[in-house]
Image: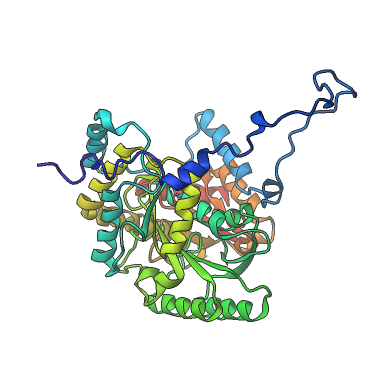
Amino acid sequence: MAHETDIPSDDDAQLQPPQDQNAAADADVSSADSMPLADDVPDHTEPTTEPVEFKVDTAQRVKRLPPYMFGRINNLLYQKRRAGEDVIDMGMGNPSDPPQQLVVDKLAEAAANPRVHGYSKSNGIQNLRREVATKYSRKYGVTLDPDEEVIVCLGSKEGFSHMCLALMGPGDTAIVPAPYFPVHTYAVALAGGNVISLEVNDSEKFLQNVAYTCQHLYPKPKLLIINYPHNPSTVTVEQGFYDEVVKLAKRYGFMVISDFAYADVAFDGYQPPSFLSSPGASDVGVEFTTMSKGYNMAGWRIGFCSGNREMIKALATIKGYYDYGMFQAVQVAAIMALRETEDAVLAQSRIYESRRNVLCEGLSRLGWDFEVPKAGMFVWARFPQEWQDQMSTMDFAMKLLEEGNVAVSPGTGFGTTGEGYLRMALVENENRLRQGVRQIKACLK
Ligand SMILES: Cc1ncc(COP(=O)(O)O)c(C=O)c1O
């Protein structure tokens, strides 16, 4: 009997985006070749002026991007690695544990099938979308139509960015939580929109500020971006928060994108709620989930967008022009992971929980100030005031790397509200985290 994760049916394996999108995307829009030239058009093969100095002039959307703040840290980390130095790396939230072996085996098996190597569907194969809907139903009690309310993305970051492109343009404003995960701001900026950042640390105040902004800004914000468990601040919310978001969205007419990247990584019995579980959420918004974090499949680039069908259709339209979908063997293995490895996802959470305990104990011993996170892959800690008085957050992070061989993300990489904070990722094992704390202590002596 064919296993349902096996190579998709013909229905799934349609190789092209929907016909109308494809036709439009492939059309010869300018038809410049066939444009007749007038007899008196001058011959451009002979130069008539002095050559100009050639310059690559990027588009305004690139020029208006905020500066990339992690460049200095990344460059030094790279140099140290090349020099063979052992750096305790708590910089990026890049999982260091492998996915389950049966998922890797399924990828190899699927890749051996000659039928999977053509273009896939840009919105993902149906069996994978169905599996995502099944997980939402099982875990959050949310019913989704896999054909119109779920789309597969090349990682949630790609999906999120293209969703912003589908929804936002010049003159449009998005509310983004501060401190911000960089793409939440950059994707809006790249789409030509403007950003208003509202502090995320007090959830009640955040909602009040959303309402206040809607009452006073003209034109009103078009989009609210939320992200809980929040990266980098680790703030979490309960379902009631999302109920209020839906009410506000309906009152003021803004759309909502919930970035639920850390849905599967939670501690102490806490279960992060889904925005889509709130009544009416699918009327106003969508939610992104990913296999990067809980499933240790970050390099595979598998994300999903679920919820409001018109927003999903808009994303599907953009993706229909830009990509031909994910390698089908990856999608088949992803079905296997979603269906068969839920226990391993829970076990991975326990690993992050133990690492969190080790790092928090170590930072407490150093006298640092932080909230113990209930979810996510980070500790968001204030470094001591005596050091804040002496140097910027960026310089402090550079000092830890230069002198202590410990890489962390400076809080200012997530906007100005991150001044005084460091984000420390739980991607090293417990012994190395202990070692990292010892190196920080030694470096600050
Ligand atoms: C809040 C948040 N959203 C999205 C992503 C990107 O996830 P993906 O690997 O699915 O693109 C990350 C990754 O660090 C993240 O922290």
Is 65 placed left or right of 206 in the picture? right
**Percent position of residue 69, x then y:** 63, 49
**Percent position of residue 413, x then y:** 60, 54
Asked if one can make out residue 181 in the rendered structure from this viewpoint, the answer is no
Question: Can you say which quadrant of the picture contains the N terminus?
Answer: top left
Could you tell me which residue is drawn at 52 percent across and 76 percent down?
202
Nearest the viewer among 14 and 268 is 14
Nearest the viewer among 204 and 90 is 204
Is 333 placed left or right of 241 in the picture? left
Could you tell me which residue is drawn at 37 percent across and 51 percent down?
293
- In the orientation shown, which residue stands out farthest toward the top? 46
- In the orientation shown, which residue stands out farthest toward the left? 1
Asked if one can make out residue 119 in the rendered structure from this viewpoint, the answer is yes
Could you tell me which residue is drawn at 51 percent across and 69 percent down?
255
Residue 52 found in image quarter: top right
User: Where 63 falls versus 40 (above or below)?
Assistant: below
Could you tell me which residue is drawn at 30 percent across and 40 percent down?
13
Nearest the viewer among 398 and 180 is 180
**Percent position of residue 104, x then y:** 26, 37
**Percent position of residue 131, x then y:** 26, 54
Is 39 placed left or right of 276 in the picture? right
Is 300 placed left or right of 137 in the picture? right
